[in-house]
Amino acid sequence: MRVVLSGGGTGGHIYPAVAIARQCEAENPDSTFLYIGGTRGLESKLVPQEEIPFKSIDITGFRRKLSLENVKTIMRFVQGVRKSKKMLKEFKPDVVIGTGGYVCGPVVYAAAKLGIPSVIHEQNAIPGLTNKFLMRYVDTVAVSFEGSEKSFSGAKKVIYTGNPRATTVAQASRDRGFATLGVPMDSRVVLVVGGSRGAKAINQAMIEMAPLLEQLHDVHVVYVTGETYFDETREAIRSSLGTMPNHLHVLPYVHNMPEVLACTSLIVNRAGASFLAEITSLGIPSILIPSPNVTNNHQEANARTLEKGGASVTMLERDLTGQGLYEAIAGIMNDESGRKQMAAASRKLGKPDAAEVLVSEIKRLASRR
């Protein structure tokens, strides 16, 4: 099977596409891929590292007010469609999959105009502008959150698949997670992550909370700052405490996050869709702090979905303090019965077979060629 993947801008769009490729390979080792991304997006660095052939087009998103830049964006879109058609004709894919981000627009639109079967995958509870545009052209829209199908009422076909990243994480080794952190097997781990680049507000709350953590008995707190904030955050905590205690681990980045998640008892994080797919796949309870700086406030919608299901507690950034965050963590970690109930609710929301379901639909469409 010959597959074109497109998605970009953030890891939340890129990693699901990579997960789809890995599932295709697992089911059909002869599968071949081409990833079409943006020249400026994170995908231009991450995808080649995954050893997936990569080509790029120049595309930007629309601004939410009238400007000359929007005229340039339209011109880039038209040029992107023309360039995408050329790439698609050369590669001759059986199917094209878009996983979000502006770059999907011209690529998936070009596929539809060429009569190539196409799929878009929406990670968030509230659809992005690009996928809302593409839904009328593609053969199938796949959604991550059950119930969000209604957002695509104009599509030919909508299916609930979950997020394919969940399948990748479901196979992670718990023992390797403990080994990565250097903590005893079966330790209780609270993981605090501010997203791949870190989050200033969460960093500040973590610094304020650090002196209180010794009250959490038999709990290792792992804080991933993001590389930009690492030095200043670590030094602020060390200055506050006079030392770095054994129960607190401050790291700039975690390269094998699936394994670390597999050994986590509670996570504090933003509410990006791919990350939520990962934690529900593993049944991890969460305290979610949605980023207020995202389109349509979609992270809060994502978080509220888990909260409604009993798997999470939502804490808005405007209400975030070190004391408040500590009390939320302690409330869960000191109530093991309640924590296990949250874990069960999280697992109930998970779709560890998401990649399999999505690839099954991809194969169905490809077989029509």
Image (spheres, rainbow, N blue to C red):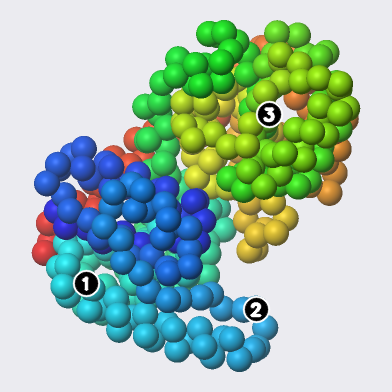
Looking at the rendered structure, the secondary structure element under dot 2 is loop
Tell me how far mark 3 sits from mark 1, CA to CA: 45 Å
Say what amino acid the circle numbered 3 marks.
Answer: Val
Mark sitting earlier along the chain (3/2) = 2
Residue at 81% in and 27% down: 238
Tell me how far mark 3 sits from mark 2, CA to CA: 38 Å
List x then y, in percent, for residue 1: 14, 53
List x then y, in percent, for residue 277: 49, 39
Q: As displayed, is residue 301 above or below residue 247?
A: below
Say what amino acid the circle numbered 2 marks.
Answer: Arg
Looking at the rendered structure, the secondary structure element under dot 1 is helix
Q: Nearer the viewer, residue 263 or 298?
A: 263
Tell me how far mark 2 sits from mark 1, CA to CA: 31 Å
Residue behind mark 3: 250
- Whether residue 58 can be seen here: yes
- Whether residue 339 can be seen here: no
Residue at 57% in and 58% down: 126
Residue behind mark 2: 64
Q: As displayed, is residue 239 above or below residue 305?
A: above
Mark sitting earlier along the chain (3/1) = 1
Q: Nearer the viewer, residue 1 or 126?
A: 1
Q: Nearer the viewer, residue 317 or 248?
A: 248
Label 3 or label 1, whichever lies nearer to me, is 3
Residue behind mark 1: 88
